[in-house]
Image: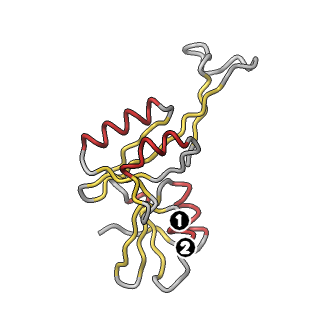
Amino acid sequence: MSEQIFDVNASAGTGTGTGTGVKKEKIKKINIFKISDLWFFKYFFGDREIFTDLTEYYLREKYRFELTNVEERNKEMKYLEEKGFEPVLIEDTAEYTVKIDKFKKYAPILRNSIDSEVKGNDRVFVMKDLASVEEAIATGAEKAEMD
C-alpha cells in the first residue's frame, strides 16, 4: 500500500516544511477498482471500528470489500476520506494486472489481489496496488496483456 506523508503545517508555496518537530500525517491510499459493474477494494484496517462500519460490504470468502453501485461507492469513499484515507478510483486495471502459469504456485499473489480468473493456461490477477504488482513479478508472475 503506498503512503504519502504531508507536512500539515508547511508554509504555503515553499514546498518544504520547517523541520522543527512539525506533526506529519500519513495519508493512506486505498485503490477502488471497477471490474464489470462492481467496485472492489482490499485493505486491512487496524481500526476495528472502521472495519465494523464497512462489514456489510465485506466478502469474507474473497477477502475484499464489494460495492454494488455508484451510490454505495460514493458513500463509502466519503466515509474513508473522513477517516483519513485517500480513495483512488481505478477503472482501467491494465497497470495492475499480472498472470502466472496456472500450474505454478500462486498463493502469495492471490493474497494481494482484488480479483482473479483462469484464462487458458494462465491465472490472471488484478493486484490491489502497484507494490503488489512488483511483488508478484518478483515471485514469477508477468504483466498481463489485456484483451
Residue 93 figure quarter: bottom left
Residue 22 figure quarter: top right
Residue 53 vs residue 4, the one in the foreground: 53
For label 1, count other residues whose C-alpha is less than 10 Å away and answer few (under 14), some (14-19) or many (20+). Answer: some
Q: Is residue 122 above or below residue 115?
A: below
Q: Indicate the quadrant containing the C terminus: top left, top right, bottom left or bottom right.
A: bottom left
For label 2, count other residues whose C-alpha is less than 10 Å away and answer few (under 14), some (14-19) or many (20+). Answer: few
Residue at 28% over, 54% down: 38
**SS label for mark 1:** helix
Q: Which residue is mark 1?
A: 111
**SS label for mark 2:** helix
Residue at 41% over, 69% down: 144
Q: How many marks?
A: 2
Look at label 1 and name its amino acid.
Answer: Arg
Q: Is residue 140 above or below residue 31?
A: below
Viewed as shown, does residue 16 lie left or right of 1? right
Q: Is residue 68 above or below residue 28?
A: below
Residue 65 vs residue 137, the one in the foreground: 65
Q: Which mark is residue 107?
A: 2
Q: Position of residue 132 (x, y in %)?
A: 54, 59
Look at label 2 and name its amino acid.
Answer: Ala
